[in-house]
Amino acid sequence: MMRVTRVTTAVLEANYDWTLVRVETDEGVTGLGEAFFGPGLTGVIRDVAELVIGSDPRDVEPLTRKMRLATAHAGAAGGLVHHAITGIESALWDLHARALEVPLYRAFGGAFRTRIRVYADCHAGDALESYSSVLQSRRPGWAPPDPMDGVVEEHWDPVEREGVYTTDAYAARARQMAGAGFTALKFDIDLPRLPGEDLYARTISHAQLERQVELASAACDAVPGVDVAFDCHWRYAAPDALRLARALEAVPVFWLEDPLPPENVESLAGLCRATSTPVATGENQYLVHGFEALLRAGAVDIVAPDFQKVGGLAEARRIADRADSHYLPVAPHNISGPVGTMASAHLCAVIPNFLALEWHAASVPFFEDLVVSGGPVIGEGHVQLGTAPGIGIELDLDVSRKYARRGELFFGEDLGA
């Protein structure tokens, strides 16, 4: 019987931290997974990984249940422990499919599609910065010099820059990404604050509302026939979210994402009932149970779980099944690197109600360089799945090592400070 002998991690410093998990066995078969970032994540993974050492890695579901039972005291309903479990579980699925010598979508029962539509997260008129585990800006070694170097910004409260967050910038970025073959895009619409706006009050000023409608209209008008969504990062109070949603009803918006805090199910349901603008949410929910309340209340139009944090790939499929029973599409949130993106794409292949998969790494110059075989990952706005086993790609360890975060072990190797 095959046994897990070792579980290691590597953290690549990209636009966010891409935390990779590698599971090794006594038969030489390995699997790769990726976990959504968070403070102290690799320490949690190391602790949780002890639960699978010595076990048969093909017992993916029993091992996942074991990890949940052992960590229920640390976050039964959600949180960082589920990021860790998801990374390990995803690596186990990759290993299981490799052991069977089949692509991951075959291990999940077969594909409805093998060409996976991707929507490009365009941020705004500039490339997205790199952020730490607590969402403060940083300058990784691969990033070009920037006039803002030395100025620490928070993801939720960036500094206004000339030529950014303008209608011209949004239109230009939309045309650029559509020209690269993407048929779906997403932009931020909640940033930055205008003078006099209170960061904590959850309100939208009249000037901000006018600006938001102008930005959305400019992006949509620039690329006729392309679907364009807009993200609010859980920023607004219910009345202001409704003002924005109604103001966008005349614009062909693909969806309005996370206009309200994720825990406020009743307000989300009221918003969905009161506007024809589609509302997407879900990236901060965990497990099937976290989505049940949304679905029962009619508090979501487009279900958007994050497959690197939701509790595992099998759990993500159960969430998609529940959404399908309510006749709702699934558009997974995804800010991961090639490993997480490919795992997500394989799962999207087996979901009948799939809409589009996010890709957040257009500003990361080495995204494709990390893949030594099985790539490119993204082409003409899609992921094309093949017949290679597991998630279908192999990492270039030499390239990955160049972008590894110092102070973290690289699959057990100490790279120094």
Image (cartoon, rainbow, N blue to C red):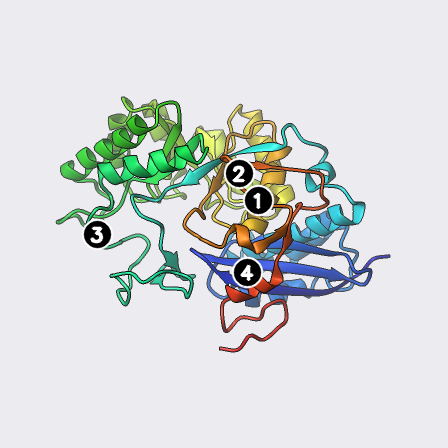
Report how far apart the C-alphas of labels 1 and 4 lie in the structure: 38 Å
Q: Mark 2: which secondary structure? A: loop
Q: Name the residue tied to disc 2.
A: 379
Q: Earlier in the sequence, mark 3 or mark 2?
A: 3
Q: Earlier in the sequence, mark 4 or mark 3?
A: 4
For residue 230, say whether it is visible. no
Give, as a three-letter code, the residue at label 4: Ala
Question: Residue at left 71%, top 32%?
Answer: 110
What is the quadrant of the N terminus in the image? Answer: bottom right
Q: Mark 4: which secondary structure? A: helix
Callout 4 environment at 10 Å: few (<14), some (14 to 19), or many (20+)? few
Report how far apart the C-alphas of labels 3 and 2 lie in the structure: 31 Å
- Where residue 414 appears, as percent x and y from the top left, is 58, 75
Give, as a three-letter code, the residue at label 2: Gly
- Where residue 357 appears, as percent x and y from the top left, is 51, 37
Question: Residue at left 53%, top 38%?
Answer: 379
Q: Name the residue tied to disc 4.
A: 74
